Image: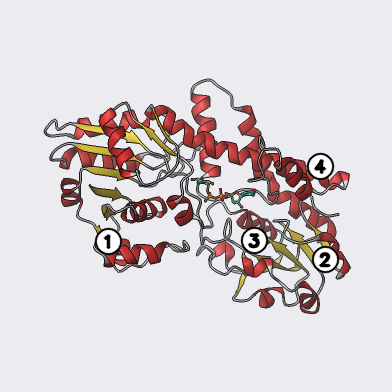
């Protein structure tokens, strides 16, 4: 089977790689000629461990190719995956502009039966819209099926997740479409759930919202742990042993960021509002997350008196390790609030870079941890990169001017840090 993947961002590039690995011929299509030119040479435009190597392998074997020629790509492939972005509109709802454009193009250019599958995270009911957009754009009424097949990849672990899925969700009323999709994935050993498109779309939002809920739950408990002299890391291990709860997504910290959780939680809340339903749990999840970074900056202000003219190091910018993605990164919120209060900032991240914005112009970007910590009054740990996890704090005691450590990812052992002479503040694990 020949497959077309439209949109070569994070989801599209990974999806194309997976199908090439599964032995199918895959074409990646994008409107961005520069991106396509780079991908054609095996160069990925974002940082994702292991992905570039696999894409290169499949370009060389002829299994994978990239193009900007929409008409030809749509006509040559019978199964088309839509992987374009669905950014948030100012009201928090998903912007379906790119999905609609692609659906209309498919409708206009199709030359026979097509199976059109959506991987992008889209609000419940979008599959029906896509089908109507394709139909309205068709010049000849060729048959087609539309299906939803949501993606559950984590950035930084995309290759691992994509090649070892824990489930495959197929949302379509068409038996033909379901069978084609099952055949595409036949070498994966995992449960396959065939359901309605609406349910498939809902499963994606419900998964992300549930994981975000676990994080905000433990983050809010961590604040109480600080008051009660209880260690939230031990609480998380203790409750995580209950298989009904599970150990994952219970790491307290400065909150979740990235391109999915913040956007998907607010989009689900909005969908509920449009249907006169209040998702009060998720509203609180969002509220806890929005205030989690300031929990740590408030503690730091209490300790330092004020941030004005204090030299503060920020270690870690990416919203999590193994990615250069800074969308909704809690580190950015911390940086902005410290800059508002006239702190002098140094920043270290092994991969991610600050946006080219005048508001960050005063931040001194450093290539090494030690350079960022030089003469610092305090440090905020914002991303758990290996180079940040493995800092030799006994050595850094001589490097920093004052030993104030604000650990936004609960990376360090409080007793060890205190024994080294640091003032140490984490989020719920200070004992
Ligand atoms: C998420 C989902 O995991 C994935 O299934 C979906 O397809 C896309 O959204 P991603 O955004 O790449 O993936 O990252 P994830 O590893 O889930 O982390 C999201 C955020 O939560 C990060 O900022 C991370 O630091 C934070 N997090 C995660 C915590 O604060 N505590 C945890 O215990 C886990």
- To which residue does mark 2 refer? 417
Q: Which residue carries the number 1 mark?
A: 33
Q: CA distance from mark 1 to mark 2?
A: 51 Å
- Mark on residue 384? 3
Q: Which residue is mark 4?
A: 224
Q: CA distance from mark 2 to mark 3?
A: 17 Å
Mark with earlier residue (4, 1): 1
User: Could you say where residue 266 lies in the image, as x and y percent from the top left?
Assistant: 54, 37
**Secondary element at image label 4:** helix
Horizontal arrangement in the rendering, residue 301 relative to residue 182 (left or right): right
Ligand 1 neighbours mark 2 (CB distance < 8 Å): no
Label 3, secondary structure: give it: loop
- The answer to whether mark 4 and mark 1 are in CB contact below 8 A is no
Residue 106's disc is none
Could you tell which of marks 4 and 2 lies nearer the N-terminus?
A: 4
Q: Nearer the viewer, mark 1 or mark 3?
A: 3
Compute the Cα span from label 1 to label 3.
35 Å
Indicate the quadrant where residue 387 lies. bottom right
- Mark 1, residues whose alpha carbon is within 10 Å: few (<14), some, or many (≥20)? some
Mark 1 or mark 3: whose residue is earlier in sequence: 1
Q: Residue furthest top?
A: 276
Assess mark 3: CB under 8 A from ligand 1? yes
């Amino acid at each position: 089977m020949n497959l077309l993947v439209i949109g070569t961002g994070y989801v599209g590039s990974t999806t194309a790689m997976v199908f090439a690995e599964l032995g199918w011929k895959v074409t990646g299509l994008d409107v961005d000629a520069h991106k396509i030119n780079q991908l054609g040479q095996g160069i990925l435009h974002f940082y994702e461990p292991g992905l570039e190597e696999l894409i290169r392998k499949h370009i060389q074997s002829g299994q994978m190719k990239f193009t900007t020629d929409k008409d030809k790509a749509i006509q040559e492939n019978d199964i088309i995956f839509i992987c374009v972005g669905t950014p948030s509109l100012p009201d928090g709802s998903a912007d379906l502009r790119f999905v609609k454009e692609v659906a209309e193009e498919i409708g206009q250019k199709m030359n026979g039966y097509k199976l059109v599958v959506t991987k992008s995270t889209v609000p419940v009911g979008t599959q029906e819209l896509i089908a109507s957009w394709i139909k309205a754009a068709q010049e000849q009424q060729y048959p087609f099926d539309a299906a939803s097949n949501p993606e559950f990849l984590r950035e930084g672990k995309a290759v691992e997740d994509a090649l070892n899925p824990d489930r495959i969700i197929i949302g379509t009323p068409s038996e033909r479409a379901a069978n084609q999709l099952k055949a595409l994935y036949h070498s994966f050993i995992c449960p396959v759930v065939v359901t309605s498109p609406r349910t498939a779309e809902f499963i994606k939002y419900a998964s992300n919202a549930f994981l975000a809920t676990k994080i905000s739950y433990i983050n809010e408990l961590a604040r109480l742990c600080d008051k009660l002299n209880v260690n939230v890391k031990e609480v998380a291990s203790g409750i995580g042993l209950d298989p009904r709860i599970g150990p994952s997504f219970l790491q307290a910290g400065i909150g979740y960021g990235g391109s999915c959780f913040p956007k998907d939680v607010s989009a689900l809340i909005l969908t509920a509002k449009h249907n006169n339903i209040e998702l009060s749990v998720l509203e609180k999840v969002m509220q806890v997350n929005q205030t989690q970074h300031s929990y740590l900056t408030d503690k730091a202000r209490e300790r330092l008196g004020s941030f004005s003219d204090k030299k503060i190091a920020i270690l870690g910018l990416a919203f999590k390790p193994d990615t250069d993605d800074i969308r909704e990164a809690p580190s950015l919120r911390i940086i902005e609030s410290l800059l508002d209060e006239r702190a002098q900032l140094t920043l270290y991240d092994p991969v991610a870079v600050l946006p080219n914005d005048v508001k960050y112009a005063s931040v001194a970007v450093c290539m090494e941890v030690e350079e960022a910590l030089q003469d610092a009054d305090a440090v905020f740990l914002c991303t758990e990169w290996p180079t940040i996890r493995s800092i030799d704090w006994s050595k850094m005691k001589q490097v920093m001017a004052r030993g104030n450590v604000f650990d936004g990812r609960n990376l360090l052992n409080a007793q060890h840090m205190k024994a080294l002479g640091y003032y140490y503040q984490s989020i719920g694990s200070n004992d």
